[in-house]
């Protein structure tokens, strides 16, 4: 990929930024030999669960960050984290990515005087990406909440659980990103100017704001899950109580019918009033029980 970070160097033009998208092993090996770096530097560099960190290797600095990534334009698609690595040294910047990042398309349209400004721009994009993603997940929580109020389907509970897990993961990763970037801001090797340092501090503040929002949203989603789980349990208990009360009310007519249906002589069994007395007794007891349960609030 061509770079938009160029500087006049005598009669020619010097390239200051080099980007590698999904680099092969041979490309990485050639780069290691060119820069005289350790052979194991790029091992597992772009695996998805790579932790954000800052390493110093000789005169070079390696910064690994985690960016939120969504593979398509579907707003319902899950957002995952993908590594983005930056290698700075000899006043040049090398970047490595496993996927095609959309913001790289804007790179050539911008004019940077040095890789430090490029690094600041990347961090600003990072904070903006997290803020946008956290807001999208927060909106997803609100939509799931509306559906839960209407249906309380199991699928919506799983959707809320997935959103809560994603926000928790983002919070933890943002904290690691902030620690790594804070170390960058304190690195003497980058020789930060006051203006650049101020822009870097603003980017860190934006990341801290995104982290706080992710923490609050994750806590809100967790509290909602607990509340809805408790509400579902209450509804189940209420349903079981109603079924129990109805069974008791219906048990009385069944008991009376059983007593008058036994094959033994009964008092006044040959009277034509006997059946009506049995039916009236059953209905009276059932009615009294129904009124009692209604007064207790069980029906």
Image (cartoon, grey):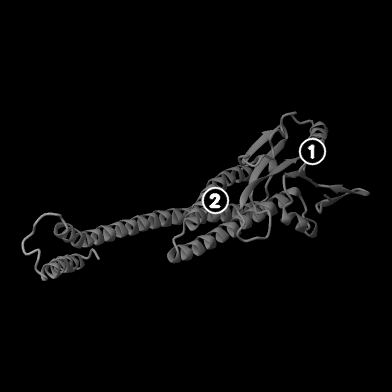
Identify the image quadrant of residue 45: top right
Foreground pick, 241 / 277: 277
Q: Quarter of the image for the C terminus: give it.
A: bottom left
Q: Position of residue 37 (x, y in %)?
A: 76, 31
- Residue furthest to the right: 11
Residue indicated by mark 2:
166
Residue 225 horizontal side relative to residue 244, left or right: right
Say which label, 2 or 1, has the lower sequence index.
1
Q: Taking 117 as reference, is 38 above or below it?
A: above
Residue 74 horizontal side relative to residue 208, left or right: right
| Helix, strand or loop for disc 1 | loop
Q: Position of residue 48 (x, y in %)?
A: 65, 42
Foreground pick, 65 / 188: 65
Residue drawn at point x = 8 percent, y = 59 percent: 266
Dot label at residue 24? 1
| Helix, strand or loop for disc 2 | helix
Q: Taking 45 as reference, is 162 above or below it?
A: below
- Residue furthest to the left: 267
């Amino acid at each position: 990929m061509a770079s938009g970070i160029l500087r006049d160097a005598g009669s020619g033009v010097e390239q200051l930024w080099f980007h590698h998208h999904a680099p092969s092993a041979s490309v990485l090996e050639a780069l290691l030999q060119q820069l005289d770096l350790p052979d194991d530097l790029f091992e597992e560099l772009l695996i998805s669960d790579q932790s954000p960190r800052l390493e110093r290797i000789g005169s070079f600095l390696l910064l690994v960050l985690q960016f939120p990534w969504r593979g398509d334009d579907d707003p319902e698609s899950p957002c995952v984290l993908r590594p983005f690595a930056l290698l700075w040294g000899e006043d040049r910047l090398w970047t490595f990515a496993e996927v095609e990042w959309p913001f790289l398309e804007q790179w050539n349209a911008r004019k940077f005087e040095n890789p430090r400004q490029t690094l600041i721009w990347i961090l600003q994009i990072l904070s903006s990406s997290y803020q946008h993603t956290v807001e999208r997940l927060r909106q997803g929580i609100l939509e799931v909440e509306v559906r839960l109020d209407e249906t309380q389907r199991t699928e919506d509970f799983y959707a809320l659980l997935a959103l809560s897990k994603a926000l928790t993961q983002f919070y933890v990763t943002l904290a690691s990103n902030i620690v790594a970037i804070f170390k960058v801001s304190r690195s003497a090797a980058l020789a930060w100017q006051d203006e650049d340092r101020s822009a870097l501090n603003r980017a860190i503040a934006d990341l801290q704001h995104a982290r706080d929002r992710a923490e609050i949203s994750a806590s809100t989603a967790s509290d909602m899950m607990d509340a809805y789980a408790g509400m579902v349990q209450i509804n189940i208990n209420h349903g079981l109580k109603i079924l129990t009360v109805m069974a008791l009310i219906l048990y009385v007519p069944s008991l009376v019918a059983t007593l008058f249906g036994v094959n033994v002589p009964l008092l006044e069994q040959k009277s034509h009033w006997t059946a009506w007395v049995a039916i009236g007794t059953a209905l009276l007891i059932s009615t009294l029980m129904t009124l009692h349960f209604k007064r207790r609030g069980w029906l």
